[in-house]
Image: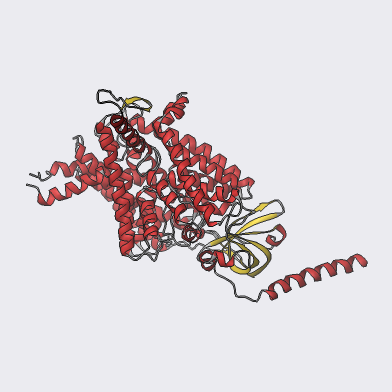
């Protein structure tokens, strides 16, 4: 019974700290273009950044690199592996990645990561879930390919004629 | 008096151009097979359409212009310069059909950037581009690095006596083996051996750094092609920063340096003559130039205080420097950071490195280290002549594979090409300034385009003026072919209209 209560308490504290960290940072999300262009201004500050998770989630020990693209640029976010666990879809040709909101400390030249411009995440919130994108067979392209194949065959036949 | 070209000139040019186009069309079947294997059907269709148009064009040209005649020097040079333009226009078709480029000019910009192994890119939403299209972006770098004509020479123009003329026209005046077709095949042997080794090294690193195996090896192959051919494209929009990995950076530095070495030197290393690396004027000059320019960059970055730790300064400074010097263009910083976070001194260091380039008969662009070495030695010789008594005989030698007596005509030729490059850098910078960009930004981007580097300080963007895009396309083309075949084409066009 005591064990159950303790686990409830831990869960509530975690949820509370997460909510507080986001509510404390009432600022609007900052775009990647703004962060890169004015990196010196935001260096070392806690910021909110939103975007689509793209590529691979690259686990490094207890942490992971997650690259997040807001439509202009992608920025690397260094986060606890546990925070990355909620991310299901990552963006690629076949997938629209999960949209997430990151709260974290921005570094224009991170001393821990060889001078990378990055964000060290303190909290991650999923805004929208990603999905698999369905590739519809493009009939126009197919028809065009068939017409061109016909022309190619005709050219090859005509080449044989003197 | 300028002589008007005769119909046989057009026939010869058309026939060999057609052969090269057929070669390009055949290469397009690689992404088709790859796309079908991955189930990327629409991208595979883009390449089928592209291959069909290319083959139709090639078959018509080879039929209409059929000839048994050999190429003259002029015709060989024109075939080369035209084949790079035509390959750009035809190679851009499948990319444009993907819908990731906002105009056909932008697609041609990226295609020329790929073929000329520059690496400046206008692609949109790269992170969602299909693997099939991404393969093609890197494959055109692999072809362009070795030389489009080399592809055709190796597989389609067997034993043609005009082959050497086209080989020279593609800015490769050194034969590794007595036969130019054997030379082309040796270049491919070196490149494909390193491709296997490089892909394995990068793929395994990718898996160890947390990437999915398929992605890791695909990225490994793409990054290898872009690094060895000193291209600079990458499968993700963040370029090399995407990987956040020191190991990845170290491996790519090694591959970039291998790509910047003369293929003739590769041959001697393969034959066991390893001492040549230390003795060769090009490797010595490259080593010295990297050290000096890095010193400039490091001093500049130290002044800015952007990088708090020495390791950060070294990783960012040295990587961008080597990437620029070898003409690759891989970046581990964002383009605007060059202007916002680096000072003028550091930028000048990178610009000088980009302008100098790697070795002749390698995959790099720019002035190249042999010419720099020759000019430096000639300068020393002249200073000695002034200092020493009049009767003293000054004999200067350089070591490039063998001992070579340095003659005035070699120094003059090196100086002429150097001057042509400096003019090209300056001309592009002036056009950039005419469009309202600051001097240093314009010079940086112009040098990057003309030296086939690919580092960007932010000017290269979809929103830049079309005339500037066109300028950079011409710079990439002229810079890659080292002027002679471009000048010959211009002369040929003039003779068509003004010849008698």
| Relative to B420, B308 lies left or right | right
Instruction: Examine the rendered structure and indicate whether residue B312 appears above or below residue A107.
Output: above
* Spot occupied by residue B390 in the image (x, y as percentages of width and height): 25, 26
* Spot occupied by residue B196 in the image (x, y as percentages of width and height): 51, 37
| Relative to B123, B450 lies left or right | left
> In this figure, which colouring scheme has been used for the structure?
secondary structure
Camera-side residue: B389 or B412? B389
| Relative to B224, A51 lies left or right | right
Image point 71% across, 71% down: which residue? A21
Q: How many marks?
A: 0
Residue A156 in view: no
Image point 65% across, 76% down: which residue? A26
Instruction: Examine the rendered structure and indicate whether residue B312 appears above or below residue B392.
Output: below
Camera-side residue: B129 or B25? B129
Instruction: Examine the rendered structure and indicate whether residue B247 appears above or below residue B269.
Output: below
* Spot occupied by residue B28 in the image (x, y as percentages of width and height): 39, 48
Residue occupying the far right of the picture: A1
Camera-side residue: A128 or B339? B339
On-image quarter of the N terminus of chain B: top left
* Spot occupied by residue B309 in the image (x, y as percentages of width and height): 61, 51
Image point 80% across, 70% down: which residue? A13
Residue B370 in view: yes
């Amino acid at each position: 019974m005591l064990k159950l209560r303790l686990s409830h308490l831990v869960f509530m504290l975690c949820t509370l700290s997460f909510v507080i960290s986001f509510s404390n940072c009432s600022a609007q999300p900052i775009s990647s273009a703004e962060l890169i262009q004015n990196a010196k201004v935001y260096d070392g500050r806690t910021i909110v950044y939103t975007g689509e998770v793209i590529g691979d989630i690259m686990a490094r020990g207890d942490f992971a690199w997650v690259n997040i693209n807001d439509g202009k640029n992608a920025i690397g976010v260094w986060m606890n592996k546990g925070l990355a666990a909620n991310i299901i879809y990552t963006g690629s040709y076949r997938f629209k990645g999960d949209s997430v909101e990151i709260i974290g400390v921005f570094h224009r030249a991170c001393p821990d990561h060889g001078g990378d411009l990055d964000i060290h995440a303190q909290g991650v919130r999923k805004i929208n879930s990603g999905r698999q994108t369905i590739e519809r067979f493009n009939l126009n392209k197919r028809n065009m390919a068939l017409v061109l194949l016909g022309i190619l065959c005709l050219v090859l036949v005509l080449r044989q004629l003197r | 008096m300028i002589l008007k070209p005769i119909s046989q000139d057009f026939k010869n040019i058309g026939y060999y151009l057609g052969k090269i186009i057929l070669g390009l069309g055949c290469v397009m079947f690689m992404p088709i097979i790859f796309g079908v294997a991955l189930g990327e059907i629409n991208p595979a269709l883009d390449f089928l359409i592209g291959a069909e148009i290319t083959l139709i064009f090639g078959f018509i040209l080879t039929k209409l212009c059929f000839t048994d005649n050999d190429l003259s020097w002029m015709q060989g040079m024109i075939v080369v310069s035209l084949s790079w333009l035509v390959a750009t226009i035809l190679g851009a078709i499948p990319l444009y059909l993907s819908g990731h480029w906002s105009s056909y000019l932008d697609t041609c910009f990226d295609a020329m950037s790929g073929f000329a192994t520059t690496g400046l890119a206008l692609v949109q939403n790269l992170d969602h581009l299909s693997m099939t299209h991404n393969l093609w972006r890197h494959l055109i770098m692999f072809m362009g690095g070795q030389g489009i004509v080399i592809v055709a020479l190796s597989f389609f123009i067997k034993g043609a006596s005009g082959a050497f003329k086209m080989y020279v026209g593609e800015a490769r005046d050194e034969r590794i083996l007595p036969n130019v077709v054997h030379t082309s095949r040796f270049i491919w042997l070196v490149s494909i051996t390193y491709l296997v080794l490089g892909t394995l090294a990068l793929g395994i690193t990718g898996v160890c750094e947390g990437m999915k195996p398929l992605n890791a090896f695909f990225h490994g192959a793409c990054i290898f092609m872009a690094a060895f051919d000193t291209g600079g494209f990458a499968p993700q929009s963040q370029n090399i920063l995407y990987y956040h990995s020191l190991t990845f950076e170290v491996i790519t530095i090694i591959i970039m340096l291998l790509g910047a070495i003369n293929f003739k030197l590769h041959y001697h290393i393969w034959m066991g003559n390893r001492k040549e690396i230390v003795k060769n004027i090009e490797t010595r000059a490259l080593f010295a130039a990297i050290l000096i320019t890095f010193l400039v960059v490091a001093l500049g970055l130290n002044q800015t205080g952007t990088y708090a730790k020495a390791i950060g300064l070294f990783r960012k400074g040295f990587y961008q420097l080597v990437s620029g010097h070898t003409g690759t263009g891989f970046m581990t910083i964002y383009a605007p950071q060059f202007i916002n976070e680096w000072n003028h001194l550091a930028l000048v260091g990178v610009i000088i490195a980009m302008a100098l380039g790697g070795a002749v008969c390698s995959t790099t662009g720019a002035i190249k280290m042999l010419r720099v070495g020759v000019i430096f030695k000639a300068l020393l010789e002249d200073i000695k002549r002034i200092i020493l008594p009049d009767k003293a005989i000054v004999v200067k030698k350089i070591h490039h594979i063998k001992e070579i007596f340095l003659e005035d005509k070699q120094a003059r030729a090196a100086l002429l090409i150097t001057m042509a490059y400096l003019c090209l850098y300056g001309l592009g910078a002036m056009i950039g300034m005419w469009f309202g960009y600051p001097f240093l930004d314009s010079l940086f981007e112009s040098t990057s385009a003309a030296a086939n580097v690919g580092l960007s300080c932010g000017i290269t963007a979809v929103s830049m003026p079309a005339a500037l895009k066109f300028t950079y396309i011409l710079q990439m083309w002229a810079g890659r072919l080292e002027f002679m075949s471009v000048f010959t084409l211009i002369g040929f066009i003039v003779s068509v209209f003004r010849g008698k």
